[in-house]
Image: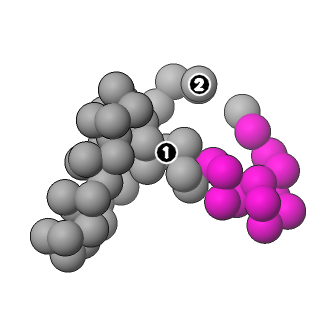
Amino acid sequence: MPKIDAQLGIRLTKDLKARLTAQAKSEMKSVSTLVVQLVEEYLESQGDGKKD
């Protein structure tokens, strides 16, 4: 994974944050790492295909 050097702040429902936290814990990842992975996979599936 490339070096992460930018931040993005988002607002989530408490339920969605809890679900993300639980999923990240089950995969032994941080929430941030999980979200980056999910966004990358989404963009690739939409035809962006770019990966640094």
Judged from the image, the secondary structure of the residue bearing numbered disc 1 is helix
Amino acid type for the residue under numbered disc 1: Val
Q: Is residue 27 left or right of residue 13?
A: right
Q: Which residues are magenta?
A: 40-51
Q: Residue 33 placed where, x, y %?
A: 41, 36
> In this figure, which residue is indicated by the disc labeled 1?
36
Nearer to us in this view, 46 or 7:
46
Q: CA distance from mark 2 to mark 1?
A: 10 Å
> In this figure, which residue is indicated by the disc labeled 2?
1
Inspect this view and state whether residue 11 appears: no
Mark 2 vs 1: CB contact within 8 A: yes
At a point 34% along the width and 46% down the height, the residue shown is 23
Q: Residue 29 placed where, x, y %?
A: 36, 30
| Mark 2: few/some/many CA within 10 Å (<14, 14-19, 20+) | few
The numbered mark at residue 11 is none
Q: Is residue 39 left or right of residue 16?
A: right
Nearer to us in this view, 17 or 8:
17
Q: Is 12 above or below relative to 44?
A: below
Amino acid type for the residue under numbered disc 2: Met
- Quadrant of res 31: top left
Judged from the image, the secondary structure of the residue bearing numbered disc 2 is loop
Specify whether residue 43 is painted magenta. Answer: yes
Q: Is 49 above or below relative to 12?
A: above
Q: Earlier in the sequence, mark 2 or mark 1?
A: 2
Inspect this view and state whether residue 22 appears: yes
Q: Residue furthest front?
A: 26
Q: Is residue 19 left or right of residue 15?
A: right
Q: Residue 12 placed where, x, y %?
A: 24, 71
At a point 49% along the width and 45% down the height, the residue shown is 36
| Mark 1: few/some/many CA within 10 Å (<14, 14-19, 20+) | few
